[in-house]
Amino acid sequence: MNDATLYRRCREGDELAWETLVRRYQGRVCSVAFGYTGSEEEALDVAQEVFVRAWKRLDGCRDPERLASWLLSIARNCCLDHLRRRKARPPAQDVPAEEIETLADPIASTDASTELNERRDVLEVALHRLSPINREAILLKDIQELPLEEMAAMLDLPVGTVKSRCSRARAELARVVASLLNTGPDLEATP
């Protein structure tokens, strides 16, 4: 079922269509939320808020063919709201990274998967060291693969500005990754 049909059925109150929509886009929404928050738990909370807002504002999608962009725009706004609230109300007590227990991967790691995980960890650390504007550009363009035109509409910026932001973001990401690989990344200490 294409997005336009799915959207139409959701607007008609079809609960199965809504469930399909959520399942189709929950991974992308969670990925965006994690990119902004840096926390799986917070990303899941934000993703839930995204879908609640989307349900309440189903009439707000102007182009059902661009349902993904509409949802990711809501996700971006929810993330920014969440970060503002988090900044206004910092946690009562931070837990040192040494005290956090990590769950073991249930699948035995091979050399290739270990290397892939190490690369993913370096990239995650690097993303969180980028400026917020550059992190957002990488998340939307390179991770979520949004077209420049949709990003421009979402950010309310000219396409040329979005294009240059993406270019600067990639350059900054390359510098940060190179720095991490040259100095040996401290994966536990992210700012």
Image (tube, grey):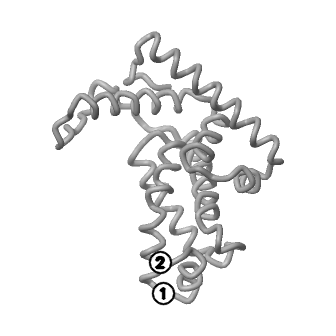
Answer left or right for 163 relative to 74: right
Q: Where is residue 105 in the image (x, y as percent from the top left)?
A: 21, 40
- Identity of the residue drawn at 37% across and 24% down: 188
| In this rendering, position of residue 185 left or right of residue 67 | left
Secondary element at image label 1: loop
Q: In which quarter of the image is residue 59?
A: bottom right
Placement of 179 over or under 12, stated as above or below: above
> In this rendering, is residue 172 above or below 181?
below
Are the residues flagged by discs 1 and 2 in contact, CB closer than 8 Å? yes
Q: In this figure, which residue is indicated by the disc labeled 2?
A: 18
Where residue 114 sits, quadrant-wise, is top left
- Residue 100: name its quadrant: top left
Say if 10 sits above or below 32 in the image: below
Looking at the image, residue 172 lies above or below residue 158: above
Give the alpha-carbon distance from disc 1 to disc 2, as whole Å: 6 Å
| Secondary-structure class at tag 2 | helix
- Residue at 53% over, 32% down: 127
Residue at image position (42%, 75%) is 19
- At x 16%, y 37%, the residue is 108
- Residue 122 drawn at (x, y percent): 43, 26
Circle 1 sits on which residue?
Answer: 14
Q: Specify the amino acid type for callout 1.
A: Asp
